[in-house]
Image (spheres, rainbow, N blue to C red):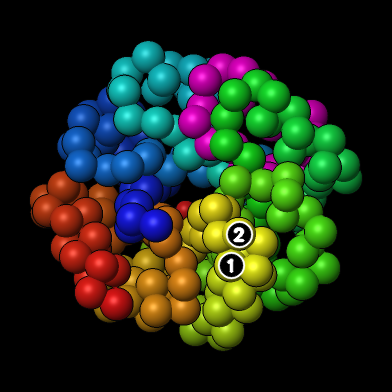
């Protein structure tokens, strides 16, 4: 699968989100971190902001729900027009139903795992998902240090995906930079979320090109 880069607007200026989207015309996705100050200790944005962002950009939105009740909210993000909606296994109480509702609303369905959550128990859910997201930091904040300890799990997830036909995308999120992206790609990831490495750069579009080249080299 071709490398895809999904810059996280968590590291952009929240008063200028339309400009942040326009600054990365070479992005495959815009990664939108929805945090509720319950599942994670940070509060960001919700459905009204996503609805406005959808009107402001043609780049598809990759919505990552770090919220306590994804079963309640995920279908609404898909119905609003998000291209991809990801829920956390640690939060969802009815993941199969919710993943099916996301797909039924026309979005790609993603399942996210925190760094300490094993992937193997979720093998039977692979038929329900279009993307697995491996958190490579504890979720909640941008700008954290990449957790190398997740790399073996990324390799194991790649093995499970390949054994399942290989169609599922494997996303990594947290501390992804020009320095760490090659290790993620070598382990088998193909969709890369990067916040501070893109929006902290003087030229965000160029940072995306550099990340893409580094991942393609691996
Ligand atoms: O989900 C996230 C944090 O929970 C962010 O998407 C992630 O941390 C991106 O920021 P950075 O690339 O700066 O680590």
Of all residues, the one furthest to the right in this rendering is 93
Task: Check disc 1 and report its element: helix, strand or loop.
Answer: helix
Q: Is mark 2 within 8 Å of ligand 1?
A: no
Q: Residues within 10 Å of mark 1 (few under 14, many from 20)?
A: few
Compute the Cα span from label 2 to label 1.
Answer: 5 Å
Q: Nearer the viewer, residue 185 or 74?
A: 185
The residue that appears at 46% across and 78% down in the rendered structure is 187
| Residue 130 point in image, percent of width and height | 60, 46
Asked whether, in this view, residue 46 is left or right of residue 70, the answer is left
Residue 105 in view of the camera:
yes
Asked whether, in this view, residue 216 is left or right of residue 88, the answer is left
Q: Nearer the viewer, residue 213 or 134?
A: 213
| Residue 181 point in image, percent of width and height | 34, 72
Numbered circle sitting on residue 10: none
| Residue 112 point in image, percent of width and height | 64, 55
| Magenta highlight range | 66-87
Task: Check disc 2 and report its element: helix, strand or loop.
Answer: loop
Query: Looking at the picture, does residue 163 appear above or below residue 208?
Result: below
Residue topped by disc 1: 162
Q: Residues within 10 Å of mark 2 (few under 14, many from 20)?
A: few
Q: Nearer the viewer, residue 173 or 161?
A: 161
Q: Quadrant of the C terminus?
A: bottom left
Asked whether, in this view, residue 203 is left or right of residue 187, the answer is left
Query: Looking at the picture, does residue 90 appear above or below residue 55?
Result: below
| Residue 79 highlighted magenta (yes or no) | yes
The residue that appears at 51% across and 43% down in the rendered structure is 33
| Residue 110 point in image, percent of width and height | 62, 46
Query: Looking at the picture, does residue 68 appear above or below residue 187?
Result: above
The residue that appears at 31% across and 23% down in the rendered structure is 58
Numbered circle sitting on residue 165: 2
Q: Is mark 1 within 8 Å of ligand 1?
A: no
Are discs 2 and 1 less than 8 Å apart at CB? yes
């Amino acid at each position: 699968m071709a490398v895809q880069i999904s810059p996280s607007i968590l590291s952009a200026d929240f008063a200028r989100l339309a400009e942040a989207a326009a600054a990365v015309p070479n992005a495959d996705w815009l990664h939108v971190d929805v945090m509720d100050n319950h599942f994670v200790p940070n509060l960001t944005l919700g459905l009204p902001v996503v609805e406005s962002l959808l009107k402001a950009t043609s780049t598809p939105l990759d919505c990552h729900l770090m919220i306590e009740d994804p079963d309640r909210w995920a279908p609404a993000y898909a119905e609003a027009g998000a291209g991809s909606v990801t829920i956390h296994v640690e939060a969802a109480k009815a993941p199969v139903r919710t993943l099916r509702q996301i797909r039924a609303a026309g979005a790609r369905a993603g399942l996210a795992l925190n760094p300490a959550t094993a992937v193997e128990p979720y093998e039977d859910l692979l038929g329900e998902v279009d993307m697995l997201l491996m958190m490579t930091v504890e979720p909640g904040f941008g700008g954290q240090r990449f957790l190398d300890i997740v790399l073996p799990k990324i390799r194991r997830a790649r093995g499970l995906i390949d054994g399942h036909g290989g169609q599922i995308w494997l996303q990594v999120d947290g501390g992804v930079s020009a320095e760490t992206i090659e290790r993620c790609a070598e382990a088998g990831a193909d969709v890369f979320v990067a916040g501070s490495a893109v929006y902290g750069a003087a030229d965000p579009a160029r940072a995306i090109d550099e990340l893409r080249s580094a991942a393609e080299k691996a």
